[in-house]
């Protein structure tokens, strides 16, 4: 692999929502489990012929099924609104992977972060994104559609060897 590997990604609403759904997965799972309690109330209400129990179960189930992805949507929306208010546009970030470190440069503000591979806590691959989770709840997003497949494969293999403290998902 030739260094540096450079990928510029745009923090669009779709990308942010995909990233936030992954980062808020625990909350979504909890809401799903709580919605199952509502479904059990419906079944119990039908079994004991209690319309009140059925009503409460349906309400409980709907509430938690609807709110399951709410934190992810809210977080993505908040980020988009903040970017539009502060910069008037969506933010673009360029990730550069070198052999001993990586950088993330916000092309809109010029701010740059430099990280070491052993600081990476988690690397998450979704359909369109590669998400790099760092300490202090910092997450970097790389849109895989902006890189060639061969480069992605080599980069993934490189990250697996260099990010030895990271969990790969």
Image (spheres, helix red, strand yellow):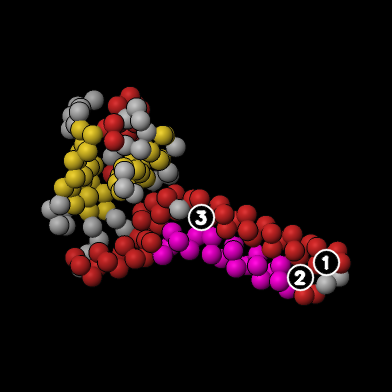
Label 2 – label 1 distance at C-alpha: 7 Å
* Residue at x 63%, y 58% (from the top left corner): 34
Residue 116 is one of the magenta-drawn residues: no
- Relative placement, left or right, of 42 versus 85 is right
Q: Which mark is residue 54?
A: 2
Point out the image quarter for the C terminus. top left
Q: Which mark is residue 27?
A: 3
Q: Are marks 3 and 2 in contact (CB under 8 Å)?
A: no
Point out the image quarter for the N terminus. top left
Counting from the top left corner in percent of width and height, residue 45 is at 80, 67
Q: Residues within 10 Å of mark 1 (few under 14, many from 20)?
A: few
Magenta part of the protein: which range? 55-74
Q: Secondary structure at mark 1?
A: helix
Residue 151 at least partly seen: no
Does the magenta stretch mainly form a helix, a strand or a loop? helix
Residue 3 at least partly seen: yes
Q: Residue furthest left?
A: 110
Residue 126 in the image: above or below residue 84: above
* Residue at x 35%, y 38% (from the top left corner): 121
Residue 138 in the image: above or below residue 157: below
Residue 73 is one of the magenta-drawn residues: yes
Q: Which mark is residue 46?
A: 1
Residue 8 in the image: above or below residue 4: below
Q: Residues within 10 Å of mark 3 (few under 14, many from 20)?
A: some
């Amino acid at each position: 692999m030739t260094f540096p590997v450079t990928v510029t990604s745009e923090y669009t609403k779709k990308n942010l929502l995909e990233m936030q759904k992954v980062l808020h997965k625990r909350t979504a799972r909890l809401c799903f489990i709580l919605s199952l309690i509502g479904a059990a109330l419906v079944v119990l209400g039908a079994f004991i012929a209690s319309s009140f129990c059925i009503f409460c179960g349906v309400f409980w189930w709907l509430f938690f099924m609807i709110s399951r992805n709410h934190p992810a949507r809210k977080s993505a929306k908040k980020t988009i609104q903040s970017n539009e208010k502060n910069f008037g546009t969506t933010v673009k970030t360029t990730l550069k992977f070198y052999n001993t470190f990586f950088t993330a440069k916000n092309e809109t503000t010029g701010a740059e972060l430099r990280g070491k591979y052993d600081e990476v806590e988690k690397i998450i691959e979704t359909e369109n994104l590669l998400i790099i989770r760092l300490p202090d709840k910092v997450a970097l997003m790389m849109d895989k559609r902006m890189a060639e497949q061969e480069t992605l494969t080599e980069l993934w293999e490189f990250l697996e060897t260099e990010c030895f403290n990271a969990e790969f998902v």
